[in-house]
């Protein structure tokens, strides 16, 4: 006892690591030892931890093990679930022992088990009672005596039953799932106790004999079956069962399959209630007679200090038990299949490692996801798992081996437990240490005031236990002492880490680049690793530098962006290692009002009115704009309203369609004090669209009015303006570049990536996903700019998937992909076989846009090379748009030749005219629609361009005949070319050629 009370500085976790400068000790089994520790847990019991670096795998191996010197106060205890077949986690089994008043010093998973049933593969003994025998082909087990000593051997326990004076072998074993007798000697007569399960688990007919053990005539206690003893029982019932039979608590069942040997079945059926059956369990090795606890081990690992040959070579997590020459034990685990933490070991490596730890005999336990080890630290009241199960969570296993004690607290201070116990730190870092008093039975208690000192290695520690690592790599021992009792922490300082990384303090997200607004501030955290292990550090341990052009950074990693657009680098370094992060400082744009809704933010006055404009000639972005009609005869006209300005915005922007009046457009801005001032937006000395902006006053909270100031002289006092896409920004900027968009379709999975050169993210409301023009739901990750969705299953038709995106400035982009038919498709039009437009015409047919032309033989023709008339084109386009034509039946057409419109196209043309898509053409002062004339390619592209929202990028026309594109069609042709809808033939666009029906099909398909 005294030697444990005097453990002093030996108590605590000793961490020894190479830290680059010192030479590492090596394990032939597992690699270079770079981190190690020890924690005494109870009398004769200590936790060991080691981390190795494997050159073979360029990765870590992490082992935990318990060394145990047998003693009367801490003893091995084997446990299992509520029944032998009931699997349980190590934690739940420990809690069961703790509920019995035991302190669980440590625990390790036990034997292999049958996955289908949960039955242990090998021997199981608890409290001296035989709970389960080993099968015929598993021979190894470890047995524990009452004094804690152990041995490894082959129990070869055989069980016999005496029935009617005849001895029969219970070849099926104890508490094993019943099987018929086999030629190899397995299966046959089986003994089940109430420890097995609630029922016999049998699924076939057989004979079940219910036995009741006879009570001891002296003590009155009912004995249980043990190795090296007999158990006398009385027959209660003989049952011809067809399946599972309930096992009464405290009873036993001798059971045999109904298809088994006739003489065995006859012997069981001959039994009568009240008959005596004697059971015995024996082993040729008498040592097993004295075991109080035992578990099986499938493979022997070490014999006489020599590693066994032919062991399993899988690299995985391992568990084992070894015995040293002095009789002490090692309960061993190495975690596996977790890169960056532990890659595991083969059984041979495990065996070699146990030999390195001094073991002369060893047997393996279950491994892989079953490997689990837990301990109760001196300052805790319950066991906690300290390994990292490769399944991610604890696996429910068949059984486990614990070391338990019933020692009670003494209140006699013996040492201090210094935490944190397992630390690796970057040179210069600080670590807050705490000393907890521990009594002579290893229970936490209140200690005295301690002093702190660095007893070996570099660095310093203050009076409150704050340790500061020195500038050199090395091992440091820090001791807490009250003059009578002491304890130490062993810390490793690393001067040169392997790598440095950055994260954001507010979100924890990894930082590989920063895109910031002018003046934006972000708090960064630096971290360092050595051999994939994190080092304790603080931001002040690193050197922070930033290019002055992009901003400044303080010693604690708080970066403040500059006030103007710029790019540069942030550099963080420590110990000769550096990480560099590119930084881009750029203004942002936020939409204030896109004018696509009901314009509820505006209010008319006596001098100004407003309306929603849908004539695309007066729309800059989207499909609508704000029309402002004003009368400034009194010197000024005002349209009131409230457009709220987010905090921090510095500029107001808006697109204005000027009227050339010579007047002036201003905006009234309200600030936080409800004071107003006017901003000059632009002089109205232009016609057409122009983007204007003005700096907002400090504290601006709303645009409260738009004001037109009469310019005097011969200027116009009344007029009409159009305004679109009101924005605010934190820097004076003008964004006309659409988002970048990529689309991928694989089977029924759709994914898209959307990025923008100004907007850091695109809100979901600015995105759409369509399938043949119909909207589909999708998932949008705004932080990563990724869209995902599932399409309907492929069928016999052609389909078109499109994603559209709009940025805060109104710029639009679109990407499309084809979905081909599943299998062969029946030809719709008999004149389209092999034609380049076949798929496009079939798509329009499936969509109900075209029905083709009936041939004399009753077949359908599409006539792809025939020039299309204007009426046919208008009708196809109206159906392609999916318009409700009944809503337009009452529209009056202004065309002088309206009577020439075919009946089948009348409502379609009315709809297209009402929507401003078809305007007609003046011929000698007369407006005509020319329904029966062919339509040129430029005219068709203009019509299709008018069906789209404004805002798509316009590509420069590089076609050889680009000069032939009429000026009235140029913007629409450029937009369709920018979207890839129009690509030309042999670098010619042929704008004035007639459009064929096949070309129409391709255009309409491409715009889906």
Image (cartoon, rainbow, N blue to C red):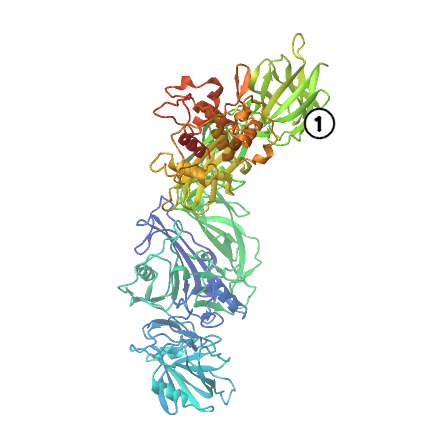
Instruction: Kindly give the residue lying farthest to the front in the view shown.
Output: 856
Up-down relation of residue 441 to residue 13 (above or below): below
Counting labels gives 1
Q: Position of residue 331 (x, y in %)?
A: 40, 64
Q: In the picture, residue 282 is in which quadrant?
A: bottom left
Q: Residue at x 71, y 27 (%)?
A: 673
Residue 628: in sight, yes or no?
yes
Residue furthest left in the image: 309
Image coordinates of residue 728 in percent, x first then y, are: 59, 27
Relative vertical location of residue 895 with respect to residue 397 in this rendering, above or below = above
Q: What residue appears at the point 51 percent right and 64 percent down from the top-left corner?
A: 440
Q: Nearer the viewer, residue 769 or 540?
A: 769
> In the image, 982: left or right of 377?
left
How many other residues sit within 10 Å of disc 1, few (<14), some (14-19) or many (≥20)?
few
**Which quarter of the figure has residue 293?**
bottom left
Front one among 757 and 981:
981
Query: In this orientation, which residue lies closer to the viewer: 701 or 902?
Result: 902
SS at mark 1 in the image: loop
**Res. 549 in view:** no
- Front one among 466 and 720: 720
Q: Position of residue 928 (x, y in %)?
A: 53, 21
Q: Is residue 293 above or below residue 519?
A: below
Residue 194 position (above or below residue 960): below
Coordinates of residue 539 in the picture (x, y in percent):
49, 38
Q: Which residue is mark 1?
A: 673
């Amino acid at each position: 006892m005294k030697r444990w009370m005097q453990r002093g500085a030996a108590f605590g976790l000793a961490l020894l690591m190479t830290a680059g400068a010192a030479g590492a000790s090596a394990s032939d089994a597992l690699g270079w030892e770079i981190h190690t520790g020890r924690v005494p847990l109870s009398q004769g019991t200590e936790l060991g931890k080691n981390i190795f670096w494997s050159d073979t795998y360029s990765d870590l191996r992490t082992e935990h093990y318990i060394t145990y010197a047998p003693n009367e106060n801490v003893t091995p205890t084997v446990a299992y679930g509520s029944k032998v077949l009931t699997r349980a986690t190590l934690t739940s089994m420990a809690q069961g022992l703790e509920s019995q008043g035991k302190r669980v010093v440590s625990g390790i998973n036990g034997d292999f088990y049958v996955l289908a049933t949960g039955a242990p593969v090998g021997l199981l003994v608890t409290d001296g009672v035989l709970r389960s025998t080993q099968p015929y082909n598993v021979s190894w087990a470890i047995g524990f005596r009452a004094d804690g000593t152990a041995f490894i051997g082959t129990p070869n326990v055989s069980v016999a039953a005496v029935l009617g004076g005849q001895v029969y072998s219970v070849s099926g074993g104890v508490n094993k799932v019943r099987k018929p007798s086999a030629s190899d000697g397995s299966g046959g007569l089986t003994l089940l106790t109430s420890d097995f399960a609630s029922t016999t688990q049998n699924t076939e007919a057989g004979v079940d004999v219910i036995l009741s053990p006879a009570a001891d005539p002296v003590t009155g206690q009912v004995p249980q079956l043990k190795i090296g003893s007999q158990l006398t029982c009385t027959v209660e019932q003989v049952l011809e069962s067809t399946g599972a039979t309930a096992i009464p608590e405290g009873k036993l069942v001798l059971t045999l399959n109904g298809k088994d040997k006739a003489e065995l079945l006859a012997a069981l059926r001959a039994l009568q209630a009240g008959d005596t059956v004697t059971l015995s369990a024996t082993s040729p090795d008498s040592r097993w007679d004295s075991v109080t606890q035992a578990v099986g081990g499938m493979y022997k690992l070490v014999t006489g200090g020599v590693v066994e040959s032919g062991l399993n070579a899988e690299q995985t997590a391992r568990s084992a038990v070894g015995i040293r020459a002095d009789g002490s034990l090692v309960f061993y685990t190495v975690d596996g299949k977790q890169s960056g933490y532990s890659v595991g070991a083969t059984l041979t490596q495990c065996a070699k490692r146990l030999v390195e730890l001094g073991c002369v005999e060893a047997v393996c336990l279950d491994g892989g996801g079953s490997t689990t080890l837990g301990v109760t630290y001196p300052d805790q009241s319950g066991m906690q798992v300290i390994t990292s199960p490769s399944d991610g969570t604890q696996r429910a296993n068949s059984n486990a081996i614990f070391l338990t004690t019933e020692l009670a607290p003494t209140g006699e201070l013996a040492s201090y437990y210094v935490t944190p116990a397992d630390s690796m730190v970057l040179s210069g870092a600080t670590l807050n240490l705490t000393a907890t008093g521990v009594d002579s039975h290893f229970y936490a208690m209140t200690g005295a005031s301690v002093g702190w000192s660095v007893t070996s290695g570099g660095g310093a520690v203050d009076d409150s236990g704050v340790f500061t690592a020195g500038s050199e790599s090395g091992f440091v021992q820090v001791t807490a002492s009250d003059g009578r009792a002491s304890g130490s922490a062993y810390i490793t300082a690393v001067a040169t880490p392997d790598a440095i990384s950055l994260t954001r303090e507010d979100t924890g997200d990894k930082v590989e680049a920063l895109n910031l607004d002018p003046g934006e501030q972000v708090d960064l955290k630096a971290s360092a690793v050595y051999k994939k292990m994190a080092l304790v550090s603080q931001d002040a341990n690193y050197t922070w530098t930033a290019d002055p052009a992009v901003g400044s950074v303080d010693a604690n990693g708080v970066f403040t962006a500059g006030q103007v657009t710029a790019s540069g680098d942030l550099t963080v370094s420590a110990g000769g290692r550096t990480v560099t992060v590119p930084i881009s400082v750029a203004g942002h744009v936020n939409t204030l009002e896109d004018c696509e809704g009901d314009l509820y933010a505006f209010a008319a006055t006596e001098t100004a009115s407003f309306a929603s404009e849908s004539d695309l000639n007066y729309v800059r972005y989207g499909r609508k704009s704000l029309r402002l009609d004003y009368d400034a005869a009194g010197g000024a006209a005002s349209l009131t309203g409230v457009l709220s300005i987010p905090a921090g915005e510095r500029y107001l922007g808006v697109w204005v369609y000027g009227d050339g009046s010579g007047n002036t457009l201003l905006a009234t801005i309200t600030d936080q004090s409800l004071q107003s001032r006017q901003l000059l937006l632009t002089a109205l000395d232009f016609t057409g669209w122009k983007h204007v902006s003005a700096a907002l006053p400090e504290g601006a909270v709303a645009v409260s009015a738009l004001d037109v100031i009469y310019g005097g002289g011969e200027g116009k006092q009344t007029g009409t303006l159009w305004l679109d896409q009101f924005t605010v920004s934190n820097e004076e900027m003008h964004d006309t570049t659409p988002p970048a968009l990529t689309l991928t379709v694989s089977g029924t999975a759709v994914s898209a990536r959307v990025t923008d050169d100004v907007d850091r993210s695109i809100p979901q409301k600015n995105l759409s996903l369509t399938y043949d023009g119909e909207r589909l739901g999708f998932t949008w990750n705004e932080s990563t700019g990724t869209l995902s969705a599932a399409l309907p299953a492929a069928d016999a038709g052609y389909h078109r998937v499109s994603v559209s995106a709009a940025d805060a400035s109104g710029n639009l982009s679109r990407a499309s992909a084809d979905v081909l038919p599943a299998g062969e498709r029946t030809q719709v039009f008999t004149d389209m076989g092999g034609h380049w437009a076949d798929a496009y015409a079939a798509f329009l047919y499936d969509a109900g846009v075209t029905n083709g032309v009936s041939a004399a033989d009753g077949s359908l023709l599409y006539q792809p090379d025939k020039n299309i008339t204007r009426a046919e084109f208008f009708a196809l386009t109206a159906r392609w748009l999916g318009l409700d034509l009944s809503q337009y039946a009452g529209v009056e057409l202004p065309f002088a030749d309206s009577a020439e419109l075919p009946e089948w196209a009348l409502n379609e043309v009315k709809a297209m005219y009402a929507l401003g898509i078809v305007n007609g053409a003046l011929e000698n002062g007369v407006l005509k629609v020319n329904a029966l004339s062919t339509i040129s390619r430029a005219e068709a592209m203009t019509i299709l361009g008018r069906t789209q929202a404004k805002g798509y990028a316009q590509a420069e026309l590089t076609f050889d005949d680009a000069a032939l594109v009429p000026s009235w069609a140029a913007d629409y042709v450029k937009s369709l070319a920018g979207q890839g809808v129009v690509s030309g033939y042999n670098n010619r666009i042929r704008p004035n050629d007639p459009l064929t029906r096949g070309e129409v099909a391709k255009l309409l398909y491409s715009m889906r």
